[in-house]
Amino acid sequence: MHDVIPTTTSSDRSLLAASLACFAVAGVGNVAVDTVELTLGATALAIVGVYCVARYAQSVDRRTLAGTSLGLWLAFLGVAGSHAVGLETIGSVAPGPTLVTVVALTAVTWATLLAAAATTTFLGFREYGSPAPAEEPDEAMFDGETSDYSTR
């Protein structure tokens, strides 16, 4: 009998949630401001968001990262459809202040767009960096035969 109590491994979804929050605040902050200081702050938050996505991408397997990327792109396309209708139109129909709805939809748009792009980029880096399948060695190399190209 084992003396150790089995524990479940911790989920790294908190990194993804933190990156979505950083991207949302950075997106709203960058759209709503005209000062350089707030733009720099929004940029710093976006950088922190990318770092969180990078850590998340390192902690999950390829299949999970691909599913996350696909889910974020689908979420972005769903939210982007609200821009076609108009954020103010949706805000006037939704209960509550129009400005709150517009800011919330803007935040979700930026968060899903940046997170989808980041997860896709890190998935691409992972696929690009993966080793290619090993090829079978050519039997001619083992038999001592030379190739058609002469070596001098």
Image (spheres, rainbow, N blue to C red):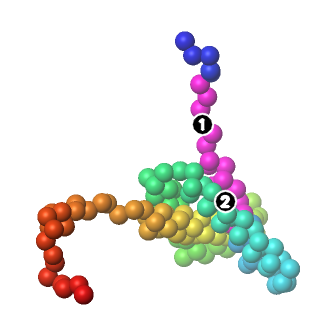
Q: Residue at x 67, y 73 (%)?
A: 88
Q: Is residue 144 left or right of residue 54?
A: left
Tell me if I can see residue 12 in this picture.
yes
Instruction: Name which residue type carries label 2.
Output: Cys
In the depicted view, which residue is nearer to us: 41 or 137? 137
Measured from the top left, where is residue 129 in percent x and y?
46, 66
Q: Which mark is residue 52?
A: 2
Which residue position holds label 1?
A: 9
Measured from the top left, where is residue 98 in percent x and y?
73, 68
Would residue 21 be counted in the magenta stretch? yes
Instruction: Name which residue type carries label 1.
Output: Thr
Q: Residue at x 46, y 58 (%)?
A: 66
Would residue 131 be counted in the magenta stretch? no
Q: Is residue 141 left or right of residue 75?
A: left
In the depicted view, which residue is nearer to us: 2 or 41? 2
User: In the rendered view, would you say 60 is above or below 112?
Assistant: above
Tell me if I can see residue 109 in this picture.
no
User: In the rendered view, would you say 68 is above or below 34?
Assistant: above
- Image quarter in which the C terminus is found: bottom left
Q: Residue at x 70, y 56 (%)?
A: 18
Chief secondary structure of the magenta portion: helix
Measured from the top left, where is residue 32 in percent x and y?
78, 77
